[in-house]
């Protein structure tokens, strides 16, 4: 009986989040899951430059795929431009910077972030949980609160700044976009996801893990 060869899947989490966001993802046993840890950003470092440094953890001598959610999806897009993944799968994110919500791009042009204390950005309340992230039950609220509390304030501020000033007009080849119909954080009428998750929120990689796992398996194993 022939044994399927392993393929490495590098998972990059959302803004400030960690591997806990992927806890419910279940993939085929031939897929070797590797969680990418954040590195310290340099002063005034752009998202593409950060992605270039982050890409050094990838073993490019073996077949691999990139899987990123939210901010991690943007980083995966940038890494895919300089590496050669078998596939890049981005979830709850934006691929092209001109598809970022207009308010975000406007804030980037005005550089308003420099006037906001880093600690303010970590606030997690009922509005951010229920409306923006779409979490509702106790388990999801607790996880989101823990993720926010564990996020380093200065990293969070740098990451938000790198998003709202991001410039990218290239969609790498073999890139697949999964998005939810109820995403209120990274929404775009112009985006055309390859897979649309009905009632999917910005937290859907955790909430609808079975559906998303099936799509990831489908893409990688085809």
Image (cartoon, helix red, strand yellow):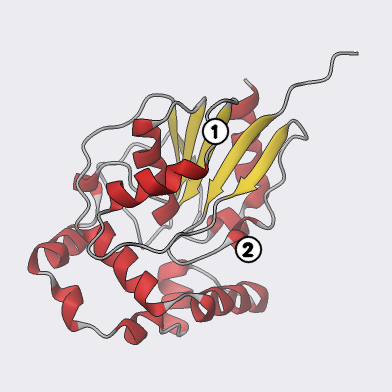
Residue 175, image quadrant:
top left
Give the structural element (helix, strand or loop) at label 1: strand
Residue 56 seen by the camera: yes
**The N terminus lies in quadrant:** top right
Label number found at residue 195: none
Residue 31, image quadrant:
top right
- Residue beneath disc 1: 65
Residue 118 in percent (x, y) is at 32, 82
Spatial separation of the CA atoms under disc 2 and disc 1: 20 Å
The first of marks 2 and 1 along the sequence is 2
At a point 61% along the width and 73% down the height, the residue shown is 143
Residue 70 seen by the camera: no
Residue 29, image quadrant:
top right
At a point 39% along the width and 47% down the height, the residue shown is 53
Give the structural element (helix, strand or loop) at label 2: helix
Please determine whether, in this image, residue 203 is positioned above or below residue 28: below
Q: Which sits in the foreground, 158 or 183?
A: 158
How packed mark 2 is, by other alpha carbons closer than 10 Å (few <14, some 14-19, many 20 or more), is few
Label number found at residue 20: 2
Question: Is 144 on the left or on the right of 55, as rendered?
Answer: right
Please determine whether, in this image, residue 107 is positioned above or below residue 191: below
Q: Which sits in the foreground, 142 or 29?
A: 29
């Amino acid at each position: 009986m022939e044994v399927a060869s392993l393929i490495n899947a590098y998972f990059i989490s959302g803004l400030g989040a960690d591997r806990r966001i992927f806890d419910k993802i279940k993939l085929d046993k031939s897929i070797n899951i590797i969680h990418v840890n954040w590195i310290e950003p340099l002063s005034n470092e752009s998202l593409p430059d950060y992605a270039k440094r982050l890409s050094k953890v990838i073993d490019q001598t073996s077949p691999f795929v990139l899987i990123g959610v939210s901010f991690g999806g943007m980083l995966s897009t940038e890494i895919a431009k300089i590496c050669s993944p078998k596939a890049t799968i981005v979830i709850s994110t934006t691929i092209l910077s001109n598809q970022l919500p207009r308010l975000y791009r406007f804030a980037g042009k005005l550089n308003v972030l420099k006037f906001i204390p880093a600690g303010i950005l970590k606030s997690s309340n009922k509005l951010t949980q229920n409306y923006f992230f779409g979490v509702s039950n106790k388990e999801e609220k607790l996880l989101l609160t823990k993720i926010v509390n564990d996020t380093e304030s200065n990293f969070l501020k740098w990451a938000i700044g790198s998003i709202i000033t991001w410039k990218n007009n290239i969609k790498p080849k073999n890139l697949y976009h999964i998005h939810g119909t109820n995403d209120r954080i990274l929404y775009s009428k112009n985006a055309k996801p390859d897979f649309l998750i009905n009632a999917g929120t910005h937290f859907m990689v955790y909430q609808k893990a079975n559906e998303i796992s099936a799509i990831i398996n489908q893409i990688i194993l085809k």
